Amino acid sequence: MGLLVNGAWQEDISRTKEGRFIRPAAALRNFVTRDGSAGPSGEGGFPAEAGRYHLYVSLACPWAHRTLIFRALKKLEPIISASITEPLYGKTGWEFSTARGGTLDTVNGKATLAEIYLLADPHYTGRVSVPVLWDKKRRTIVNNESSEIIRMLNSAFDAFTDVHTDYYPAGLRGEIDAVNKLVYPNINNGVIHDAGAFRHGLLQPFQMQSAARRRLSESVELHARSLSGSRNSRDREHRSHQTALLRQPTASESDRHRSDRTHDRFCGPARPQSVRLNQFAPVCCAPSSVPKNGAPLRGPVPKQRQNRIQERARRLSDDWRAVG
């Protein structure tokens, strides 16, 4: 990953000596409001209007992806347009293309997201990150912090939609902010920039810090217990399937064992290719030892079927490497 320095692209310099990626804070923090007044940060002059704003996102980025989810929840697709980058990071950052589920830049006609940042500020210094909320009228970036963008979508555009559900109610904001303060650095960044970061080029292989791994596993356990322990009426009414998936382990398991198990699940190394291939290898044995549909096999697995299974295993292995 690279970044812009005084308007010029350069290679990544934001790693520690151990190779750990440092995620900087978003730099562009203006707010769209109902009347155009200034928000919690930045300047004013960004009133909510139909067709004025545009989202730049990547489906490969969970922070950007949630702005699309929120846009759909509030039925704002006709109000706020969007462009989607390719899922793979290019030599100069996020790129626009119709390949692999992406789209072209339908607003400014640029080839890369870096050019969008330079339209807003020709001397911009910082990361070229998604999501980006773009103002078509003022031709500038409003905001590139996903948590703030979804809060704008939550209430600023209520005049243009019949969905007035408040996902950030005033009475729960303190609790929501407290949970996010714990989840964001320890779980969100822990998974993306620690446990799985080397898969995305953000962390060099075998350079994860033991403290970061432990912090991730302990945070997952903490929030699993919090979810499983919620028994008030609000949680019973709105509990999602994730609560069941994160159910608290049985009391007979020791805390150390639960923590180690969570650590292994998130941070364990990928199985060697030979192990993955052997998992799908055919078993040729005596007719009485392997039942098929309740009846014993009449002989060894045919050679043609062995070849099909091995080919399927090779394809699965290639898919695994492509994802990894």
Image (cartoon, rainbow, N blue to C red):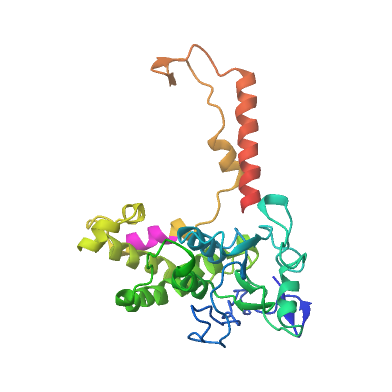
Tell me where residue 223 sits by quadrant.
Answer: bottom left
The correct choice, above or below, for 89 with respect to 211 in the image is above
Magenta part of the chain? 257-263
Q: Position of residue 276 (x, y in %)?
A: 57, 42
Q: Position of residue 253 (x, y in %)?
A: 27, 57
**Nearer-the-camera pick, 291 or 287:** 291
Total numbered labels placed on residues in the image: 0
User: Residue sitting at 69 percent across and 50 percent down?
Assistant: 100
Q: Position of residue 310 (x, y in %)?
A: 63, 31
Which quarter of the rendered picture does the N terminus lie within? Answer: bottom right
Q: Position of residue 40 (x, y in %)?
A: 48, 86
Is residue 77 shown left or right of residue 126?
Answer: left
User: Residue sitting at 24 percent across and 55 percent down?
Assistant: 250
**Nearer-the-camera pick, 167 or 75:** 75
Please identify the dominant SS of the magenta region.
Answer: helix
Is residue 300 shown left or right of residue 252?
Answer: right
The correct choice, above or below, for 260 with respect to 284 in the image is below
**Nearer-the-camera pick, 215 or 156:** 156
- Magenta-drawn stretch contains 262: yes
Tell me where residue 200 sits by quadrant.
Answer: bottom right
As drawn, the residue found furthest toward the top would be 298
- Magenta-drawn stretch contains 23: no
Residue 231 seen in the current view: no
Tell me where residue 143 sits by quadrant.
Answer: bottom right
User: Residue sitting at 72 percent across and 52 percent down?
Assistant: 98
The correct choice, above or below, for 174 with respect to 300 in the image is below
Residue 3 seen in the current view: yes
